[in-house]
């Protein structure tokens, strides 16, 4: 596959690299606080974050992986569709991914809100353990000593007050987790490539050939599994990846790819 950057792909590449450099030269806190995507229920949420979060990345590996997908697959789509249609597609997938992630996050956050309120009304050591294990396992590990003391003094006002503070901190910490990255748009690009060029072979790690349709199917299955698994400590927005693929699928089908297959 010949690598030749197209105008929009080149612009997106430079913008993403520019933001990453800004993050690492003194502006990270400002950019994350204002332009990362926050929960709909967070006081930090702004509508424009559905777009701006796509240009921020958490590490050089995060940036490199996304930009690798951009430069390898996106130029083919831009050449096929033209600059305007490709750019429209890119943002639809990225924004769609953000909306899907935010929708699932909203449902989960509502559950946490209800659980925290139940605890505030009826605080018990067992209730604290259940809440932390389910929603904030790291806090649970850090608070083991306090929890043991609380169990020995379940009616102690100081322990009850401290436990409520722990619940509040865990809740607001979960509420204000930022989401960043162009992964939703990139997964949309992968889906489009697989739909339009299903039998094109891709070298995984530059060694193992696999057809695009199978590679994307495996990616989708993995993201679906991880999305349902919800492993503690997993900071990857798997639902956003699936959202990018879903919106790409819908848009490509809407554009009539059933009648236009490309090798």
Image: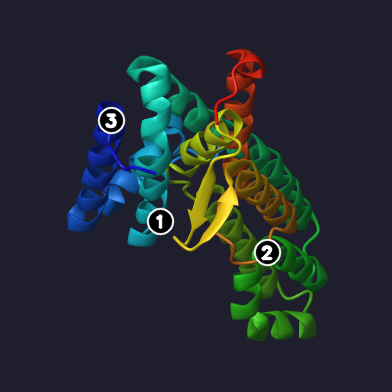
- Regarding residue 47, the answer to whether it shows in the image is no
Task: Tell me the mark number nearer the camera, choosing from 1 and 2.
Answer: 1
User: How far across and down, in percent of the image, does residue 134 sit?
Assistant: 74, 63
**Disc ID at residue 145:** none
User: How far across and down, in percent of the image, does residue 253 sit?
Assistant: 64, 19
Q: Which comes before the other along the chain, label 1 or label 2?
A: 1
- Regarding residue 110, the answer to whether it shows in the image is yes
**On screen, 90 above or below 180?**
above
Residue at 48% from the left image edge and 46% from the top image edge: 179
**Disc ID at residue 62:** 1
Quadrant in which the N terminus is drawn: top left
Task: Tell me the mark number nearer the camera, choosing from 3 and 1.
Answer: 3
**Side (left or right) of 139 relative to 1:** right
Q: Residues within 10 Å of mark 2 (few under 14, many from 20)?
A: few
Residue at 58% from the left image edge and 43% from the top image edge: 212
Task: Tell me the mark number nearer the camera, choosing from 2 and 3.
Answer: 3
Residue at 38% from the left image edge and 25% from the top image edge: 78
Task: Kindly check if marks 1 and 2 are in contact, taking CB atoms under 8 A apart as contact.
Answer: no
Quote the CA–CA distance across marks 1 and 2: 19 Å
**On screen, 39 above or below 63?**
above
Quote the CA–CA distance across marks 2 and 3: 38 Å
Q: Please name whichever residue, 106 or 165, is drawn nearer the observer in this view of the structure.
A: 106
Give the residue number, with chain letter if any, for mark 3: 6
**Disc ID at residue 231:** 2
The secondary element bearing badge 3 is classed as: loop
User: How far across and down, in percent of the image, does residue 222 sit?
Assistant: 67, 54
The secondary element bearing badge 2 is classed as: loop
């Amino acid at each position: 596959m010949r690598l030749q950057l197209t105008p929009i792909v080149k612009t997106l590449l430079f913008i993403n690299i520019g933001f990453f450099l800004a993050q690492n030269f003194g502006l990270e806190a400002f950019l994350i606080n204002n332009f990362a995507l926050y929960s709909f229920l967070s006081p930090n949420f702004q509508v424009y974050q559905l777009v701006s979060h796509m240009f921020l990345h958490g590490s050089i590996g995060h940036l490199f992986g996304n930009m690798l997908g951009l430069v390898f697959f996106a130029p083919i789509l831009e050449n096929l569709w033209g600059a305007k249609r490709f750019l429209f597609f890119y943002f639809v997938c990225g924004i769609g991914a953000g909306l899907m992630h935010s929708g699932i996050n909203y449902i989960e956050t509502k559950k946490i809100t209800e659980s925290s309120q139940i605890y505030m009304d009826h605080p018990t050591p067992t209730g604290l353990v259940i809440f932390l294990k389910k929603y904030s396992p790291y806090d649970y590990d850090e608070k083991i000593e306090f929890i043991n003391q609380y169990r020995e003094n379940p009616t102690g006002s100081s322990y009850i007050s401290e436990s409520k503070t722990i619940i509040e901190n865990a809740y607001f910490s979960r509420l204000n987790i930022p989401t960043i990255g162009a992964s939703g748009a990139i997964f949309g690009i992968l889906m489009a490539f697989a739909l339009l060029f299903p039998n094109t072979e891709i070298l995984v790690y530059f060694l193992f050939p696999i057809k695009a349709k199978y590679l994307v199917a495996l990616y989708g299955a993995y993201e679906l599994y991880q999305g349902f698994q919800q492993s503690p400590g997993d900071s990857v927005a798997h639902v956003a990846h699936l959202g990018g693929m879903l919106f790409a699928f819908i848009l490509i089908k809407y554009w009539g790819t059933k009648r236009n297959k490309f090798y």
